[in-house]
Amino acid sequence: MKKGRVRNAIKDLRKQAGLSQQALAEKVGATRQTINAIEQEKYAPSLELAFRIAREFDARFEDVFQFLPD
């Protein structure tokens, strides 16, 4: 089975929106630590959280998250 990794544009989108990690976390129902880990690509969010994040930025899911196979 091939593996891969999930990349994201959350940090850039968050900064463009003028949001702190804490503010974004509160809006999407997560912790600041979770947002930090996702931004650093140390943690892939659940599908539900990923969609909530994309919706918060009024962006398409594919514009926020990308899967890169190894």
Image (cartoon, rainbow, N blue to C red):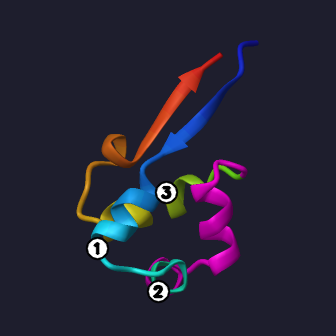
Residue 50 image point, x, y percent:
49, 57
Disc 1: which residue: 17
At label 1, which amino acid type do we have? Ala
Position of residue 61 in the picture relative to residue 25 (left or right): left
- When asked about the image quadrant of residue 51, the answer is bottom left
Precedes in sequence: disc 3 or disc 1 = 1
- The residue depicted at 68 percent of the width and 61 percent of the height is 37
- Residue in the picture at 46% in, 86% down: 23
Q: Nearer the viewer, residue 1 or 11?
A: 11
Secondary structure at badge 1 equals loop
Q: Is residue 58 above or below residue 8?
A: below
**First along the sequence among labels 2 and 3:** 2
Q: Position of residue 39 (x, y in %)?
A: 57, 57
Quadrant location of the C terminus? top right
- Mark nearest the camera among 2 and 3 is 2
> Residue 23 bears which disc, if any?
2
Q: Which residue is mark 3?
A: 50
Instruction: Characterize the local packing of mark 1: few (<14), some (14-19) or many (20 or more) Cα atoms within 10 angstroms.
Output: few
Precedes in sequence: disc 1 or disc 2? 1
Q: Residues within 10 Å of mark 3 (few under 14, many from 20)?
A: some
**Which stretch appears magenta?**
25-42
Image quadrant where residue 40 sits: bottom right
Q: Which corner quadrant holds the N terminus?
A: top right
Dividing the picture into quadrants, the one containing residue 18 is bottom left
- Alpha carbon separation for disc pair 1 and 2: 11 Å
Judged by its main secondary structure, the magenta piece is: helix
Residue 32 sits inside the magenta stretch: yes
